[in-house]
Amino acid sequence: MSTAGTIRIVVLLTAVAGLEAACRSGLIAPFSIVPPSAMLVSAFRILASGEYTADILATLGTVALAAVLSIAVGFAFGVILYLFPRLKRAADPFLASYYAVPSFIFYPLFIVMFGLNRWPLVAVAFIFSCVAMTIATIDGFLNVRPILRKVAQSMHLSRSQMIRLILLPAALPYLFTGIKLAIAYAFIGVIAGEFIQAGSGLGYRIAFAYESFQTGTMYGLLLILLTCVVSVNTVLGVRERRLYERLNR
């Protein structure tokens, strides 16, 4: 393990131990935060009971669907904007200011369009994460080394061949960053949407536990959610490091 990784783990364990001591000593009121050990016990109890399994699966399924749609559509839109520079110049102001407007304001509209089901959550997460993939795709293609473009021209490759054989492999690090951002934004969009108005899902259960003063259950669900997000991010991080190692050989 690297030195940075060791320091990160030591800092995390120290923070957890400090929070545990503060909660057990009464410095922090139990109705505000429960000890980390109690969070862990609550998370195991929730998973063992199966009471919230359907909600967990509903949230993860919604996140997966929104992420897949945003990655596919965002990549396609990024390729189109790259191939048509005039269209890209027209879209640049929109892309630059896109995240200045919170996408959650469209949630009531999506409820009217799709009904009270999971599709409004998919739509909110999609519009929140799609543009991140689009921007990453454009940046990746624009930052390909000029020598690679000259190689493609010297070989008289068609536009589709140049994208598939030259630009796409060279832009993989940027695309991987876009995928990571799209998945993270999909989680944010779905959980926030479930907080606002939903009848199931992890976000809904966390909000309900908070409003019902079920502090232990709330933090147990938060720990489960955090574990899911960290696990996905860890897997993507490992794949990204392997990709960089392969490209740098």
Image: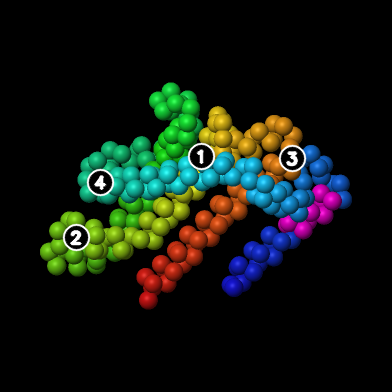
Q: Disc 1 designates what residue?
A: 190
Residue 6 in percent (x, y) is at 64, 69
**Eye-nearest disc, 1 or 4:** 1
> Which amino acid type is marked by label 1?
Val
Q: CA distance from mark 4 to mark 2?
A: 15 Å
Image x and y of residue 216, in percent: 74, 43
Q: Is residue 135 left or right of residue 100?
A: left
Picture mark count:
4
Report the side of 150 relative to 176 (left or right).
Answer: left
Position of 224 with respect to 83 (left or right) is right
Distance (Cα) linking label 1 and label 4? 27 Å
Q: Residue furthest top?
A: 112
| Pointer 3 residue | 215
Looking at the rendered structure, the kind of residue marked 2 is Gln
Q: Amino acid at mark 4?
A: Ile
Q: Residues within 10 Å of mark 4 (few under 14, many from 20)?
A: some
Where in the figure is residue 157, as x and y percent of width and height?
15, 62
**Left or right: where does residue 46 sit relative to residue 53?**
right
What secondary structure is found at the residue carrying circle 1? helix
Q: Which residues are magenta?
A: 15-24
Which one is closest to the eye, mark 2 or mark 3? 3
Q: Quadrant of residue 165?
A: bottom left
